[in-house]
Every structure is written in C-alpha cells, then in structure tokens.
Amino acid sequence: MTDKSAENNTISQGEIQAIIEKYDIESATRKLPIKWNKAVTIVAVLFSSFQVYTAIFGALAPQLQRSIHLTFALLLAYTLYPFNRSKRDKSMRLIDYILIGASSFIALYWIFNYEAIVLRAGDITRLDFVMGIIAVLLVLEATRRVCGLPVFILGILALLYCYFGRYVPGEFMHRGFSIQRIVAHMYLSTEGMLGVPIGVVSTFVFLFLLFGAFLKRTGVGQFFNDFANAIAGRSSGGPAKVAVVASALEGTISGSSIANTVGSGSFTIPMMKKMGYRPEFAAAVEASASTGGQIMPPVMGAAAFLMAEFTGIPYIKVCIAAALPAVLYFTGVFLSVHIEAKRLGLKGLPENEVPKLWTVIRKRGVLFAPVIVIVVIMDMGFTPMRAGLWGIVSSILVGALFKESRMGLKKFIESFEEGARTAVCVAVVSATAGIVVGTISLTGLGLKLATGLVDIAHGNQLVTMFLTMISSIILGMGVPTTANYIITSTICAPALLTLGVSVIAAHLFVFYYGIIADITPPVCSAVFAGAGIAKSDPMKTGIIATKLAIGAFIVPYMFVYSPQLLLESANLISLFWIVPTALLGMFAVSSGVQGWLISELNIFERILLFIAGLLLIHVGALTDLLGVTILLCVYFFKKWRSRSTQQKMNSCQ
C-alpha cells in the first residue's frame, strides 16, 4: 500500500474528539478555564460520593434522593454546557450563574421542606407553585443544552397537551388541567420529574456508570480489542469481524452507541479500509455492531434496570430474555461481514498482527471478572445497587493486579469525575422523560395511543406491530438510550399489551426499534459518527448498516410470535433445538440479504433463502423442517452450479 493510502486510513486523536463532539451531543462540553475545571471536579466527586454513600448505607426517601441527584446533574449541566451550543462559549455568562444558583436553591427547598411537602399530599402552596415552575424550566433548559432538541421538544409538547387537551380534536381530547395541577403533578409527586425514571437512575444506573468509569481504567477496552482480534483476526475479512466482536463486548458496559462507534471504530475502521473494505461498508459494520451493543445484556445502555422496574420482572430475568435476541442480532451482522468478505475475496490479518488467544486470556482474562461478578450477584438475589457497588469494588481489585492500572488517589478522582459527567445526560433526560410519563399518567394518553394504533390496524396484530415499529423508530431518532426506552415503553408498548403480547416481549420489541433508529436513515447518529471516521457517504453507509442489521428488524417479530426465543418456559432440551435453528435462520437471512452463498445469488434464490431464514427463526418443528429443506436445496444447487462452472473452465483451458 502506498504512503498516501496508508495516511488516508489513519485518524488522529484530534479528529476522533471532533467526531465525538459533533455527533455525540452530550460529549460536546464547554472548554472551561482551570478554576472552573477544578470546580467541576469538586462537584462531580461530591456527586459520585453521595451516590456511593447512599448505596452503602441505604438510599434516602425517594423525593430527597431524586431531587439531590437531579440537582447535582443540573449544576454540572449548566457549568459544562453553554447556552449556545454552536459557539461553545469558554467563559461563563450571567445566565449560567443564575441557573446554577436556582438549581442549588431548588435542592435546598426540597431538603428543608420535605416533611411539610409530603404532609400536604399534593396541596400546593404559592411558594411550591413558584418553585415547581422554576424546577420544570431548569430541567427543560438543561435537557436542551445537554441532549439537544428532540427530548426537549417532546417535554414541551407533553406540558402543552396537559393544559390544552380540551382543544385537541377526536379521541385524544381530555378536560385539560390547570397550571397549578400540572406543576403539582410534575414537581411534587413521584409521577413526574421525580418519578420512576430518575428514581432508577439515582440508585441503580449511576453506580453502573461509575462502574464503567472504573473498569475503563483497568484497560478493559484494549483487552476487548485484543480478545476480538485473537478470535476473528485471522479469518476472512478479519478486521470487520473484530469490529463486531469488540463492539459486542464493549456494548455490555457502554451506554451510548455513538461513543461505542467512535471508541472501537477509531481502531477497526482504518484497519478494515486497509484490508480492502469499502469505506461505506467499514463504517456501516462498526455502526451496526456498536448500536447492537445497546441491546446486549447485562447493562443494555442502562435500559435493563429501567425495564426491570417498569415491568416488575427481576433484572436477571430481563437479561436472560434479552440474551438470545442479542446473540441473533450479532450473528446476523457477523455472517453478513463473512459473506461480504467471501464475495470480495478478502483475507484475514497477517499472522504477526494477531495475538494468540490463550496469551490474551492468560495475561488479561481476569478483566472479565467484574462483569461476571455483577451477573452472579444479581443471580443470587441482591439488588442492582448492591451489584453495581460490588462491580466497582471488583474492578478496583482487578486493576490492582496490573501496575499500570492500579488505583491511586488521582485515578479515583478521575473515575468519580467521569462517572458523574456521564450521568449528567442520563439524569436530565430521565427527568424530562418523567414529564412525558407524568403526562401519560395524568391524561390517560398511553391508553388512548394504544387504542388508536389498534383501531388503525383494525385489531390485526401484525399491522399493529408494524405501526408500533415505525412509531418506535421515529421516537428513538436522536434520543439517548435511557430516554429512548422510557419514551417508547410508555407510548408504544401499551398497544402491544392490549393485544395480549407478553410484557417482556412488548418492552423488548419497542426498545429494539428505538435503538435501531441510531442506524436507520435519515437520522442515524451512529452511522454519521462511523462515516466521519471512514470519510464515507453517510446515506450510503446508513443503507448498508440497515442491511447488516436486518436481524434487529426481524427478530422482534419472531420473539413476539415465538416467546421461546426469550427463553420463556424453555427447558434445556428445547434450547438445544431453538438456538441452532435460529442461528441457522440468521445465516439464511444474511445470505439472502447480501446476495451470496458460494457464488452470486439471483433474485429468486435470495427470496428463497430469506423465506428459509424466517421459517428457521420461527420456533416450530414444521417451519424448521421447511426452512432446512429450502436452505439445503439452494446450497446444494449452488454447489453443483459452482462445480459445473469450474469443470467447464478447466476443460476450456
């Protein structure tokens, strides 16, 4: 390869940071002077210390725990994020000081008036009303600064609907509520801003964000890359397969598909381009794999904890239910990569660039331990808060085994600060999502939306699922993972529940499609991030990423019709049948979509393979038999054609 092409395949740290700040909104923080950076560090460390303290000694009363947590997030939001995002102001403005002061005052008001507010039981005073108005405005403005316009606009529309509902035509009309009633519901109750979303974030989720910050300092990211490289680096199209495996591993602890795309993509995308993959395909592989990380247990971008709270299903069962669909998703992407590599005749990485698997495991395999510790502790019946706490402790102990990752005071402070910074977006967006949830509980909007979708579909389950899929994709566009699940589960999931779909299937269904919005054109934020690294056309990249992620568009329909894919009521014997046939189905679907099986497929063969894949993914003896028969017929036919073609070429020679 020439020096010029080699140069085109590299990307500097500065370019990586610029891409993160451009496409990952929450990463675009203000460039502060030293004194303000020190202030941020102090507030962030206090934030994390408060969370760890309540995890060890027990959480405070719900309103206190949640309001203090939200206040810390607001203080950091107004310090780190400028009023005008495009200018990225370095200096603080008067409005920032006012908003920081107001945020502090809101917390003090709750702390010193907590008992009186609870005893009044929703009877709002004039001072409550004023403080409530200020709190709602503070949360909405912080959401605009930190997370951008989509969730901010949704929060505004929710409040307007509460007040102007009497003027809405048709089934969505309601009697309307006074401003005092709306403020009391959103600010004083545990059904608005201080509702379940921020409740889960202020207890379980924060500790897992902090756990991720500590685990990162053990060198787990490089370990994941080395592990993936050792597994898949030598095979056909090795770099692309490395991207899939590494992103799946990073997704177990990552809370952002964009951050995952840029984090591993800065390593894998140049490597894929160097080996002969088109820039669009390289970026699409990384984006689709990184987005899939958000549906990979045990963390699932923090949605697993929210799902457990919303559905009442134990966390460990949520993880078990999500496991096989996530495996099918990544299998589909992996196979698509393999098929593309075979079609292009791409080879694996050179032997000297691929580490030995046993060497990687022997030297750094212990870095898997913290993730295993979390799953084991949850399986033993402990709370997610306790599991997150032990995860942090285990990551510190694991880091102590290696000289370069041992935790001194500086690394502790850095980890506490990073955990708090990461939590800012999650906290403010959860508070705004709480406004949406509060609107639904106050107005009955959820039932009206569910009824409306079912009525449009005339009660047909398949049509209702399709409409729910489209709604979830639209609502998930440009929305962070946590808010994504809160919004789609409260607005879209009820439509499926009214038709008798199981609770876990309905919630996973809408969550999958909300997440897939990150790679679905036109608003495909993870794709734009990957395309920025690969220097490829974003729309072409988005189309390829959608093809690669075909499993995410199919599998949710399959597990609604076949709950066994969620391992509900599945025994060990049935698993030996379900898992292999489902994986074989993903192979058939991937071949059909990519148009390659031994050789190029014509349109008829592609349709046959796609049908075979759907039949195999669907659980049932008859469908599996038909699927295997079709797959084998196409395979042996292509084998025969390929052999005949080769014999003719040999005879001509």
Image (tube, rainbow, N blue to C red):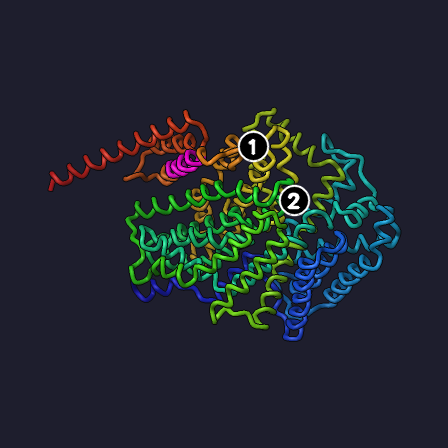
Between residue 294 and residue 316, name the one nearer to us: 316
Which residue is label 1 attached to?
Answer: 465
| Marker disc for residue 309 | 2
Say which quadrant the C terminus sits in: top left
Between residue 306 and residue 78, name the one nearer to us: 306
Seen in the picture, residue 371 relative to 499 is either above or below; the reply is below
Seen in the picture, residue 206 relative to 95 is either above or below; the reply is above
Give the residue type at disc 1: Met
Give the residue type at disc 2: Glu
The picture places residue 358, in percent across and down from the top left corner, at 36, 58
Please indicate whether residue 397 sits to the left or right of residue 585 in the image: right
**Residue stretch in magenta:** 575-588
Question: Label 1 vs label 2: CA separation?
Answer: 24 Å
Please indicate whether residue 420 sits to the left or right of residue 106 in the image: left
Q: Main secondary structure of the magenta part?
A: helix
Say which quadrant the N terminus sits in: bottom left
In what element is the residue under mark 1? helix
Residue 582: within the magenta?
Answer: yes
Question: Count of labels shown?
Answer: 2
As drawn, which residue projects farthest toward the right? 126
Residue drawn at (38%, 51%) of the image? 241
Residue 125, can we see it?
Answer: yes
Residue drawn at (34%, 29%) of the image? 630
Residue 522: within the magenta?
Answer: no
The picture places residue 161, in percent across and down from the top left corner, at 74, 41
Residue 148, can we see it?
Answer: no
The picture places residue 619, in percent across and down from the top left corner, at 46, 30
